[in-house]
Image: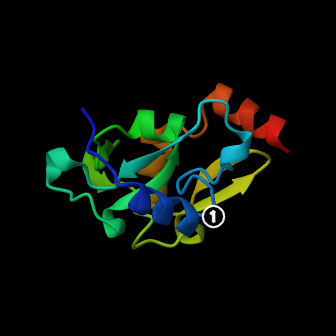
Amino acid sequence: MGAYIPDRLRALVTIRAEHRCEYCKAHEDDSFLGFQVDHIISIKHGGETEAENLAWSCFACNNNKGSDVGTVLLPENRFIRLYNPRSDHWSEHFELLDYVFYAKSEIGEATIKVLKLNDVERVMERQLWF
């Protein structure tokens, strides 16, 4: 069961994100499934339901992220944390060219992997938006 997000806090998160997914940058008007408030650090891992730990997320990004905070990148088998919209700058970790995300850092690589940003369906969806 998800945490209750008060309406004022949900509105703050939505407006701060300019109605865009803070991970893949999709606009909520382009989404059939709607957007959700994501706990950047999940409650399971000690994250709080407060503005600095919340992000506006499309269904696909939020569903793929789940309660993850990072992943193991091969071949080094090193744990790398995911992109944090509150403390990281998007353009330092990602580049979007021809509807495909390219990692500019290990954090970008880990996030692209976990959120499945370059799955065929997601790339095709971005093509439709533009």
The residue nearer to you, when weighing 124 against 16, is 16
- Tell me: residue 108, above or below residue 73: below
- Residue 106 in view (yes/no): no
What is the x, y in percent for residue 24? Answer: 59, 50
What is the x, y in percent for residue 113? Answer: 46, 40
Residue occupying image coordinates x 19% and y 49%: 43
The residue nearer to you, when weighing 9 against 64, is 9
Left or right of residue 123, residue 94 in this image: left
What is the x, y in percent for residue 47? Answer: 20, 57
Residue occupying image coordinates x 58% and y 60%: 94
- Tell me: residue 105, above or below residue 33: below
In which quadrant of the rendered image does the C terminus lie?
top right
- Tell me: residue 97, above or below residue 32: below
- Residue 14 figure quarter: bottom right
Residue occupying image coordinates x 31% and y 44%: 71
Residue occupying image coordinates x 27% and y 55%: 41
- Residue 110 in view (yes/no): yes
Q: Which residue is mark 1?
A: 18
- Tell me: residue 116, above or below residue 83: above
Under tag 1, what secondary structure? loop
Left or right of residue 53, residue 14 in this image: right
